[in-house]
Amino acid sequence: MNQIEIIRRQIGALSNILLLFVWYIIGNKLGDTAIVYVAVTVGVAILFSTVVCGGIPDVVGKILRSKRNKGQYKNVHKIKQCTLLVQIVMGIFFSLLMFLLAPVLAKWVFHIEYCTLLIRALSLFVFFKTLSSVFCGFLQGEGFELPAAVSGMFRPFLILGFSRLFYTKLA
């Protein structure tokens, strides 16, 4: 692990700490029921996206970096094509699975049937997260760690913005 990867992981840890403060702010602003809706919805979306593309950026980045250093450019191109194709198919499949299982998850697993529409709305997040993780892996294979660090820092702010939609609707 080189120095740039260490810095990127430190920024990721910092963004997770920042996420705790975001949840605290959201909890104070929204109240009890709305924070539960947002937490369940974001939790389900993060669970599905973790299943689909948990360590893809790091793995693809390491494989591409080692192949590129050896001069195997044809293999790099094939790995990029196959990875992108497989992740697109998995992203579509898990997005549809999340969309179709939203009533079951909301009603029978979490016992909050009002979250069904919210879970369905965030099912597209899984697909876009899958694509972005593949492209982050491609960039890490080229030696660029900045996109992964920037996306880690923006995640808490996106969740805050998503929750702000509920605050304006409920207030």
Image (cartoon, rainbow, N blue to C red):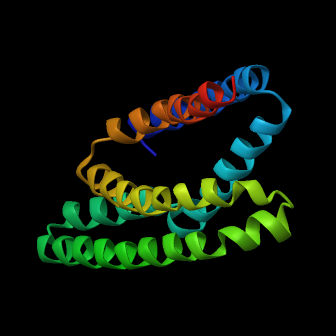
Q: Is residue 67 left or right of residue 103?
A: left
**As displayed, is residue 98 above or below residue 41?**
below
Residue 9 picture location, percent across and down: 52, 38
Q: Residue at x 27, y 46 (%)?
A: 143
The answer to whether residue 3 is seen in the rendering is no
The answer to whether residue 143 is seen in the rendering is yes
Q: Quadrant of residue 36?
A: top right
Q: Residue at x 63, y 33 (%)?
A: 166
Q: 39 or 2: nearer the eye?
A: 39
**As displayed, is residue 56 above or below residue 23?**
below
Q: Is residue 134 left or right of residue 44?
A: left
Residue 167 picture location, percent across and down: 65, 27
Residue 151 picture location, percent across and down: 42, 38
Q: 135 or 58: nearer the eye?
A: 135
Q: Is residue 22 left or right of residue 95?
A: right
Q: How many marks?
A: 0
Q: 84 or 117: nearer the eye?
A: 117
Q: Quadrant of residue 149?
A: top left
Q: Residue at x 40, y 33 (%)?
A: 150
Q: Residue at x 26, y 75 (%)?
A: 79
Residue 155 picture location, percent across and down: 51, 36
**As displayed, is residue 74 above or below residue 71?**
below
Quarter of the image containing the C terminus?
top right
**As displayed, is residue 112 above or below residue 108?**
above
Q: Quadrant of residue 48?
A: bottom right
